[in-house]
Amino acid sequence: MSGLKMGDGIMEKTAENITLDREWIKLMMEAKTLGLTVDEVRLFLAETGGK
């Protein structure tokens, strides 16, 4: 990481990624609780454009 300075957005992006990862984990756990398979989740995301 040489040449990086504070304010380059690295920490902000890392914090954002952690938040998104936690949200994805929560959503996948909810899908599992509902009995959805990984393939069903993938199909849903593909059909809805991931929105």
Image (cartoon, rainbow, N blue to C red):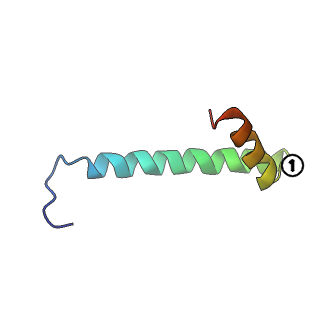
In x, y percent, where is residue 43? 77, 45
The extreme right residue here reads: 35
Between 23 and 50, which is closer to the camera in this rendering?
50
Q: Quadrant of the C terminus?
A: top right
Q: Residue at x 31, y 45 (%)?
A: 12
**Amino acid on which the number 1 mark rests in the picture:** Gly
The extreme bottom residue here reads: 2
Q: Residue at x 57, y 44 (%)?
A: 23
Mark 1, secondary structure of its residue: loop
Q: Residues within 10 Å of mark 1 (few under 14, many from 20)?
A: few
In x, y percent, where is residue 40? 81, 47
- In the picture of the structure, the residue carrying the numbered disc 1 is 35
- Rendered view: 4 above or below 20: below
- Rendered view: 50 above or below 29: above
In x, y percent, where is residue 38? 77, 54
- Rendered view: 3 above or below 14: below
Q: Residue at x 86, y 49 (%)?
A: 35
Q: Residue at x 48, y 45 (%)?
A: 19
Q: Tell me: 17 left or right of 23.
A: left
Q: Quadrant of the N terminus?
A: bottom left
Task: Give the number of callouts.
Answer: 1
In x, y percent, where is residue 44? 75, 40
Q: Tell me: 49 left or right of 16.
A: right
